[in-house]
Amino acid sequence: MINIDEFVIRLQKVMDFYGETSSSFAEKIGVQRSSISHILSGRNKPSLDFILKVLSSFPDVELYWLINGKGTFPSETQKEILKEDILPQNILKKDPTPKSDNAIERIIIFYKDGSFQNFENN
């Protein structure tokens, strides 16, 4: 049986990760906005159809993680993709040439799960 309080936290984490509002999330998975509202408030439990729509629309979400919290989100693969999309490649080089006196010394990325990555300009 799904613990609705923990499910709501995980669903909110998915929405936050993808930058979705309740309305945009409902539109993406193809449900009414009231369905999202009722689930987030704890009024209704998610149906199997609802869960399958989330998994279909957001393939990086793992079934077991969404239902019972076992596993990880986002996946390590998704974190790597995000890192490549966000960071310019010259920051990751060992010996970048500074373009001014205000060269970047260090970048730290904090993830919502409490972990972080540190990139230093050596």
Image (cartoon, helix red, strand yellow):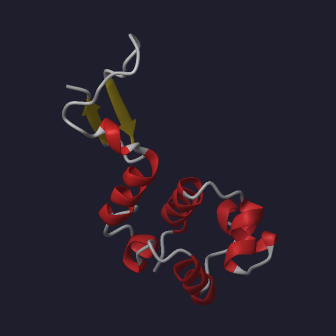
Q: Quadrant of the C terminus?
A: top left
- Closest to the observer: 78 or 5? 78
Tell me residue 81's x, y (percent): 39, 60
Q: Quadrant of the N terminus?
A: bottom left
In the rendered image, which quarter is residue 18 located in? bottom right
- Closest to the observer: 49 or 58? 58
Tell me residue 67's x, y (percent): 45, 75
Instruction: Name the residue: 62% across, 76% down.
Output: 45
The answer to whether 69 is drawn above or below residue 83 in the figure is: below
Q: Residue furthest bottom?
A: 49
Q: Residue furthest top?
A: 101
In the rendered image, which quarter is residue 35 located in? bottom right
Tell me residue 51's x, y (percent): 56, 81
Relative horizontal placement of residue 60, taking residue 19 as reference (left or right):
left
Tell me residue 11's x, y (percent): 55, 64
Instruction: Name the residue: 62% across, 89% down.
Output: 49
Instruction: Name the residue: 36% across, 56% down.
Output: 79
Count how many numbered circles sit on residues in the image: 0
The answer to whether 13 is drawn above or below residue 29 in the figure is: above
- Closest to the observer: 65 or 117? 117
Relative horizontal placement of residue 13, taking residue 32 as reference (left or right):
left
